[in-house]
Image (cartoon, helix red, strand yellow):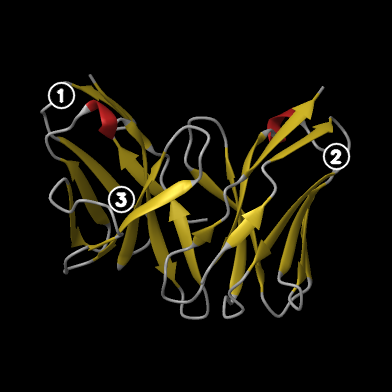
């Protein structure tokens, strides 16, 4: 079945890099996504990666994909207090709803 | 990215009343929309998949007579919580799927916080 696993908590100091890891199970997912949820808000699409890529960089965000191990990571460079949020990894088997992990709560210490 | 709106953003109601939540895709057409429920400090729980012009598909354990879903157009889906009770208090988030052929993406609304007294 489909399952997405993430660590639940991550705490980093302001200015350091944050790395959030995720494992997924469905190898048919063409795209993999990272969403950010700030307190009391909906989910904001942060970035995505196509399954035939192994890396994607978008400003402070770097997504790494190891398709063989079904491992996805999100690196946030120069983490700021405004990056404190819950980050959801999601796989998207075609024509079905997104399958989410439980979310990683990132706390940034000033 | 595409924009999905929800209305209202929060609502407080008395037990026994019904509450309607609207979800709109503002700059794209969505043949499929999804309704999620989120409890504090938990992930999103998919309640139902709503397809334009047809009946919604509910996830196991979700009462279809309790949570009425209507997807009357390609840009609007509504969720009605009928005869709401305090245990229905939650954060409800809708999502709309944009299909560009080569890539599908789900965009989320800002959520509706429901408090039933």
Q: Is residue A31 above or below residue A72?
A: below
Q: Is residue B103 above or below residue A101?
A: below
**Which residue lies at the image location 48% right of the left edge and 35% below the top edge?**
A41
CA gap, disc 2 and disc 1: 47 Å
Output the chain of dot 2: A
CA gap, disc 3 and disc 1: 27 Å
Q: Is residue B57 above or below residue B63?
A: below
| Structural crowding at the residue carrying mark 2, measured as other residues with C-alpha within 10 Å and reported as few (<14), some (14–19) or many (≥20) | some
Left or right of A74, for residue B3: left
Q: Which residue is mark 3?
A: B24
**Eye-nearest disc, 3 or 1:** 1
Q: In front here: A59 or A67?
A: A67
Which of the labelled discs sits on residue A58, or is there none? Answer: none
Q: Which residue is mark 1?
A: B15
**Which residue lies at the image location 16% right of the left edge and 68% below the top edge?**
B53
Output the chain of dot 1: B
**Eye-nearest disc, 2 or 1:** 1
- Residue A86: % across, % down: 62, 40
Q: Which residue is mark 2?
A: A78
């Amino acid at each position: 079945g489909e399952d997405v696993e993430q660590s639940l908590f991550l705490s980093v100091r302001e200015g350091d890099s944050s790395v959030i890891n995720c494992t997924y199970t469905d190898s048919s997912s063409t795209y993999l996504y990272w969403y950010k949820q700030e307190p009391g808000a909906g989910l904001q699409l942060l970035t995505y990666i196509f399954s035939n890529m192994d890396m994607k960089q978008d400003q402070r965000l770097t997504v790494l994909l190891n398709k063989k191990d079904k491992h996805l990571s999100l690196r946030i460079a120069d983490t700021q207090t405004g990056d404190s949020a819950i980050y959801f990894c999601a796989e998207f088997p075609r024509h079905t709803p997104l399958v989410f992990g439980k979310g990683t709560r990132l706390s940034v210490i000033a | 990215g595409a924009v999905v709106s929800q209305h209202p953003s929060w609502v407080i109601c008395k037990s026994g009343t019904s509450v309607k939540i609207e979800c709109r895709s503002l700059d794209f057409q969505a043949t499929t929309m999804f309704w999620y429920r989120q409890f504090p400090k938990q992930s999103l729980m998919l309640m139902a998949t709503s397809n334009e012009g047809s009946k919604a598909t509910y996830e196991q354990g979700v009462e279809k007579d309790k949570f009425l879903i209507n997807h009357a157009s390609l840009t609007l889906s509504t969720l009605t919580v009928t005869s709401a009770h305090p245990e229905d208090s939650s954060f409800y988030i809708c999502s709309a799927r944009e299909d560009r052929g080569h890539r599908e993406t789900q965009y989320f609304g800002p959520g509706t916080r429901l408090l039933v007294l």
